[in-house]
Image (cartoon, rainbow, N blue to C red):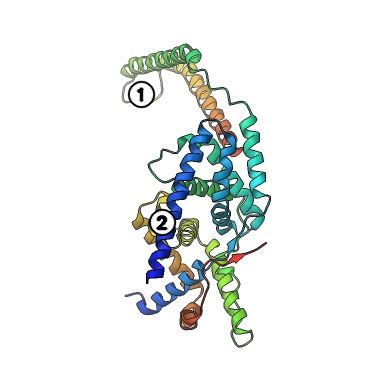
Amino acid sequence: MVLRFREEYLQEMQAAISAEEDLADVNRVLAGEAQAFEGIVRRWQGPLVNMAWRYCRDRGRAEEMAQEAFLRAWRGLASWRRESSFSTWLFALAANVFRSELQRFPAVNVPLEDVAEPAGPATQHEGLTERRTQEAVRRAVLALPTRYREPMVLYYFHEMDVAAAARTMGLPEGTMKARLARGRELLRKRFPQLNEQSAPLKSSTLQPKKEVLQ
Amino acid sequence: MKPNVNLETDHDANDVIDRILAAEEELVPSSGFLAATMERVRDEAACPKPIPFPWLRALPGIVLAAGVLGWCGFELARVVLVNAREISFTQLHLTATAGRALEPAGWVAAALAVSMLSWLFARRLAGRSGLL
């Protein structure tokens, strides 16, 4: 319990420091010091590349899209009104960039009903089947209709924080919740075996956000 | 007929979906990402700022154009109203005077529509290329 509070406190401290650093860097950039933008890219490259990855599931393209988002942020830095946090502004801008990039050149997605279902547990190793199911579910998110896909992507990107996802999309929280519910419903219909798997998955120890080195 | 809903099962399935999607693996940006991004930013910073549209210089032209358009609209409305009085309910075709008066107005309207469409098309193209 104490450890959890300490962790939360450290996270809050880290966020506050990052916000101060962002503000200082933005001020320096606006004063004409282009090099100060490096601090912003350094702090936010991970989140933006990961956010882009969730939109297209293509590493190369995710980096291109994240780079484009940084460039747009650089151009529009003066338009950040400081009413919301820098991260909220940056994520909203990035979401717009990713959305329009994917409209211009859509990611290669298969229709939801064509997302490959994993083989039955009897024929495959259990762990492998579980991993395949997880990957199929993640891919199926990209096959959802756009209005449900983006809320799903942003909700899980923001570590299941409806308010943060709603702010990024510029939607009311109620609308976001309704779209999330519908998105989940479509996934449940596509993967009825998720109901059967709920028990073993509940007991399994899925590591949240484990890092993958290149 | 009530839909077949099993709240408990749906809740469990939602839980599974949450666990799967929240446990997404995290990518580490490639080592050259920061340098490549900063290079593009520096290139952009080195470019001269785009020349702003000279609103002050264009203002007289805009006012003049608006005046001409307004005058055309007023004249057109006046001609139509004057001729409309001459048309009886049984006479559905336009009188020769009204026809002659409306002929150039039609061309003006067509020219304006073409200009508007070409402007919209140009904006759309510019938007796609990222210029706007």
Identify the image quadrant of residue B115.
top right
Q: Please identify the quadrant where the C terminus of chain A is shown.
A: bottom right
Q: Measure the C-alpha gap from mark 1 to mark 2.
A: 81 Å
Position of A118 relative to B56 (above/below): below
B84 or A97, which lies in front?
A: A97
Seen in the image, is B21 located left or right of residue B98? right
Seen in the image, is B108 located left or right of residue A176? right
Q: Is residue B87 visible?
A: yes
Point out residue A128 in the picture as x, y percentages from the top left corner: 62, 79
A37 or A163, which lies in front?
A: A37
Point out residue A84 in the picture as x, y percentages from the top left corner: 39, 45
Q: Which residue is mark 2?
A: A12
Point out residue A206 in the picture as x, y percentages from the top left corner: 52, 74
Position of B52 relative to B3 (above/below): above
Circle 2 — which element? helix
Q: Please identify the quadrant where the N terminus of chain A is shown.
A: bottom left
Residue type (three-letter) at the residue carrying disc 1? Gln
Mark carried by residue A14 = none
Residue type (three-letter) at the residue carrying disc 2? Glu
Circle 1 — which element? loop
